[in-house]
Amino acid sequence: MDYKVTLDFAPVYECIASLNAFIGKQNHNAMDAGASWVREVQTRFAPVMLQRMKEVMKLTDNFSLSPYIWSCPEERTVAGFLDWFEALSPGELYEIAGRFGQTVPSNLTELRSSAAEVIRAWDAGYFSSINPAILEGLQQEAAARAALLNGANDMEIYEAATAGMRLYPSETLKQVIITPQYHARPLVTTSFFDEFVFTSYSCDVLPPEEGRPAPALLRLTRALSDETRLYILRLLTGKQMNFTEIVKEVGLSKSTIHYHLIALRAAGLVIVHTAGKNTSYSLRLEALNGLPGQIGEYLEG
């Protein structure tokens, strides 16, 4: 059974994505913004609020707000969403979670209050002052990609948006909601539910400085500049391998291989085959085929 892809965007998606990017220490080295952005933003908050953010985000780590944002009938600005979210009765909270097959914690109402508190603080201290061009660009990206959907190319649109994630149909999966994000670039994050999948994909909405290479070209050339990553690409040429097989063949630690796969995925050099809980990787030739043109365009530009 084929699934349907829907493009969605609202400012509150990016607000929460930026908060997760800030709190998720394990991903800081992999993000384009990097540790320098984290250090700069930290100066905007009192230590007690930073600690509160970390505590609440850890408590809600396995509980996604995406189904609630998707279900929100009100204006989905940060304030508009939170006003609606905080006004939901306990029964309404549980009903939405149940509709998506989300595991519902017993303290859902308390988690809701804590999450709303932290998101409001994050919006006041950081998100409300970001460059408006970021949100405008994300909105335009979602609209442009939605216009490419023709009812028969959903799987292809998903793979193109995520630069190589191939999500296979299943008996239960009905709808895939994809949302462009800026702050966590080049990471792609996905939440799986019974019949729904929510994926936040990377989008470079701001142009590079005059004369500087585009972020996508930098990711590609950096990914190809490492011996181990080139070896992994050679292994993946013409076949699919899972993570365990790659670790065994390369002979390095799981954490090291994980780091290299993040770089290869960010550059669009690998296809991530996802079928249920099974994931494997193969070479994505599209990225390599486009490299000479990208370099030539940059040098001549």
Image (tube, rainbow, N blue to C red):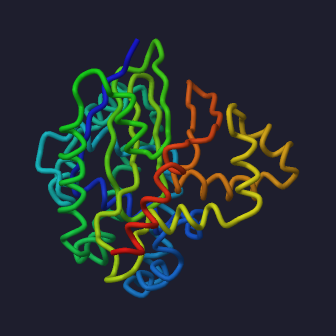
Of 100 and 211, nearer the camera is 211
Front residue of this view, candidates 200 and 238: 238
For the C terminus, the quadrant is: bottom left
Residue beneath the point at 46% across and 69% down = 22
Q: Is residue 129 above or below residue 285?
A: below
- Residue 286 image position (x, y, % from top left): 49, 44
Examine the image and state in which quarter residue 19 appears: bottom left
Residue 132 vs residue 254: left or right? left
Q: Which quadrant would residue 97 be assigned to in this image?
A: top left
**What residue lies at 23% left-to-right and 75% top-to-bottom?**
131
Q: Is residue 189 above or below residue 37?
A: above
Position of residue 190 measured from the top left corner of the image (x, y, whole percent): 46, 42
Residue at left 32%, top 36%?
177
Q: How many dots with numbers?
A: 0
Q: Is residue 84 left or right of residue 289?
A: left
Image check: 30 left or right of 256? left
Q: Quarter of the image holding residue 30? A: bottom right
Residue 20 lies, with reference to residue 235, above or below; the image says below
Q: Nearer the viewer, residue 170 or 288?
A: 288
Percent x, y for residue 212?
40, 80
